[in-house]
Image (cartoon, rainbow, N blue to C red):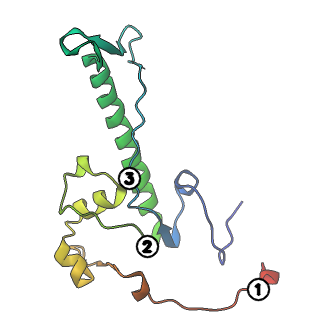
Amino acid sequence: MPLPENAVNIMTVHAAKGLEFPIVFVPDMGSGFRDRPGPIMIGNNPFLVGVKVPNPADNYEMTESAVLVMLRELQRQKERAEKKRLLYVALTRARDHLFMSGTAPEDSLLSFDLGRSRIEWVFTALSVTGDAIAAGGLVLPSGLRLSIVSDPLAIPAETGRVSFDEC
């Protein structure tokens, strides 16, 4: 079923895959990633099990086994790779204009792999610095202009009436 041309389409990144739109909004880019590791993890080989174990050298406090630490890191890497793929899909749906919203990272140029949010990945990949934020943006090597608005009240807005009878 074709999408209406003069309508706002709100959809998941998965649903937008393969589609293109004149204007795309990607909200909440500054939201941090939540790693939710379990207390027990099983590797691809079912004999590879990571658990917490009592550590006799530390008054028998529960300590993560080396296998659990390794399995959690492998899981984190897989999840990050999938999040990067989804971000790529989201950002490449725009034909004319792409709007991203989120709080700018406090650290200047983190490692791309260590980014704690999608906006940190974008800032790192595009070498966005505090100077670029203060200047209101930068021109990318491709010639595209990246505008950065740090004051929400400075965003130009138009007001108008919407008639729900027309929908």
Residue 99's tag is 2
Residue 75 point in image, percent of width and height = 36, 31
Identify the mark nearer the N-term, 3 or 2.
3
Identify the mark nearer the N-term, 2 or 1.
2
- Give the alpha-carbon distance from disc 2 to disc 1, as whole Å: 25 Å
Name which residue type carries label 1.
Answer: Ser
- Give the alpha-carbon distance from disc 3 to disc 2, as whole Å: 19 Å
Mark 3 and mark 2 residues within 8 Å of each other at the beta carbon: no
Res 165 quadrant in image = bottom right
Q: Residue at x 31, y 67 (%)?
A: 104
Q: Give the residue at mark 3.
A: 32
Q: Is residue 73 left or right of residue 131?
A: right
- Give the alpha-carbon distance from disc 3 to disc 1, as whole Å: 37 Å
Residue 115 point in image, percent of width and height = 27, 51
Residue 155 point in image, percent of width and height = 43, 86
Q: Is residue 95 left or right of residue 120?
A: right
Residue 132 point in image, percent of width and height = 21, 77
Between label 3 and label 2, give the one nearer the viewer.
3
Q: Give the residue at mark 1.
A: 163
Q: Residue at x 45, y 90 (%)?
A: 156
Name which residue type carries label 3.
Answer: Gly
